[in-house]
Image: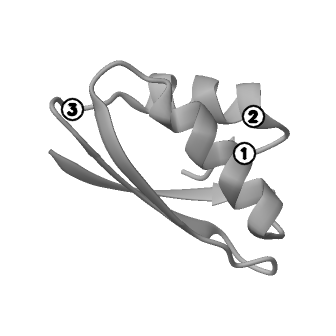
Amino acid sequence: MDQNWKATGLTCDHCAQSVTKSLMGIAGMENVSVEVHPEAPSSIATKGSREFSPEEISFAMRQAGRYILAK
């Protein structure tokens, strides 16, 4: 299942790598693609074997750093 998210706090490739690594740790996650926009919400595309809740994504992002899922 493909899902798209917006997040704030990502400013560089290192941020994208941290978020990707953390999101890939979610059970059922198959692929993560992050497009960083330092001055605006960044785009995160996830693909998994199931639908992920905003709470799961938000928790994983907080584990990676000070990244916040945009509403």
The label on residue 29 is none
The location of residue 2, given as percent across then percent down, is: 21, 53
Instruction: Give the class, few, some or many, for how many residues have Cα within 10 Å of label 3's Cα (few <14, many ≥20).
Output: few
- The residue beneath circle 3 is 51
37 in relation to 7, above or below: below
Q: Quadrant of residue 13?
A: bottom right
The relative height of residue 44 versus residue 38 in the rendered view (above or below) is above
Mark 2: few/some/many CA within 10 Å (<14, 14-19, 20+): some
Q: Amino acid at mark 2?
A: Ala
> Dot 3: what SS?
loop
What amino acid type is highlighted by mark number 1? Ser
On the picture, is 5 further left or further right than 3? right
Q: Give the alpha-carbon distance from disc 2 to disc 3, as whole Å.
A: 21 Å
Disc 1: which residue: 18
Up/down of 57 relative to 36, above or below: above
Image point (34%, 49%), residue name: 31
Q: Earlier in the sequence, mark 2 or mark 3?
A: 3
Give the distance between the C-alpha atoms of the residues marked 1 and 2, in whole angstroms: 5 Å
**Looking at the picture, how far across and down is residue 57, in whole percent?**
50, 33
- Label 3 and label 1: CA atoms lie apart by 21 Å
**Which residue bears the numbered disc 2?**
64
Labels 1 and 2 touching (C-beta < 8 A): yes
Give the image location of residue 70, x and y in percent: 60, 53
Sooner in the amino-acid sequence: mark 1 or mark 2? 1
Is there any visible trace of residue 10 in the rendered image? Answer: no
3 vs 1, front mark: 1
In this rendering, would 40 be left or right of 54? right
